[in-house]
Image (spheres, grey):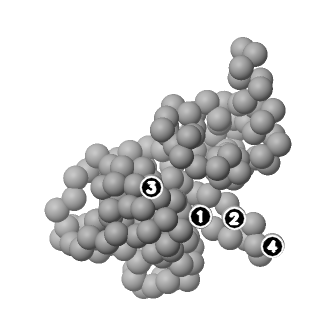
């Protein structure tokens, strides 16, 4: 176990890295994201305090995700061999549950339902990240996010 203190904007993992780690956020905010061939960022997930952020590739396989700090953070770094690590199960369970819900929603739910799920899942993040990042996470444009927020107010 190791503790790192990434500064806001610092990239702690790059797509293509091998032997990536598991990051448990004690303080601050991380995000994981991919960048497509056109250079567009697609946010996979946010990692606020108490959450775990990692790429799901095996250690010897190049990872798919970038991970960076959106705020100055305090992060516990663990090896991917979780059998050897003393890790609490709750952050991992949170992560898996949110990912499963997110995949299902991206396949079937309208944007307003995805936004409402985001607000419930990440109640504090809405004020902590730019709206373009929220839109990226939801898989919609910033303009569509403004429209969704307006629709939600009129409900």
Q: Are marks 1 and 3 in contact (CB under 8 Å)?
A: no
- The residue lying at 36 percent from left, 49 percent from top is 49
Q: Is residue 105 left or right of residue 78?
A: right
Name the residue that disc number 1 marks. 33
- The residue lying at 65 percent from left, 35 percent from top is 115
- The residue lying at 33 percent from left, 49 percent from top is 50
Which mark is drawn over residue 38?
Answer: 4
Task: Looking at the picture, tell me which residue is in the foreground, 1 or 57.
Answer: 1
Q: Are marks 2 and 1 in contact (CB under 8 Å)?
A: yes
Looking at the rendered image, the disc whose residue lies closer to the viewer, 1 or 3, is 3
Cα distance between the residues tagged 4 and 2: 9 Å
Upstream in sequence: badge 3 or badge 2: 3
Cα distance between the residues tagged 1 and 3: 13 Å
Cα distance between the residues tagged 1 and 4: 14 Å
**Secondary structure state at the residue bearing disc 2:** strand
Name the residue that disc number 2 marks. 41
**Secondary structure state at the residue bearing disc 4:** loop
Residue 117, placed above or below residue 143: above
């Amino acid at each position: 176990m190791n503790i790192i203190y990434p500064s806001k904007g610092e990239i702690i993992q790059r797509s293509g890295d091998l032997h990536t780690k598991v990051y448990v956020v004690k303080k601050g905010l991380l995000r994981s994201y991919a960048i497509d061939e056109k250079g567009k960022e697609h946010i996979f997930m946010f990692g606020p305090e108490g959450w775990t952020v990692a790429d799901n590739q095996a250690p010897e396989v190049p990872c798919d995700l970038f991970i960076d700090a959106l705020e100055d953070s305090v992060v516990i770094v663990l090896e991917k061999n979780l059998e050897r690590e003393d890790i609490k199960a709750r952050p991992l369970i949170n992560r898996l549950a949110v990912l499963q819900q997110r995949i299902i929603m991206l396949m079937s739910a309208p944007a307003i339902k995805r936004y409402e799920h985001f607000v419930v899942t990440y109640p504090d993040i809405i004020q902590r990240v730019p709206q373009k990042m929220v839109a990226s996470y939801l898989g919609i444009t910033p303009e569509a996010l403004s429209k969704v927020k307006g629709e939600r107010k009129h409900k």
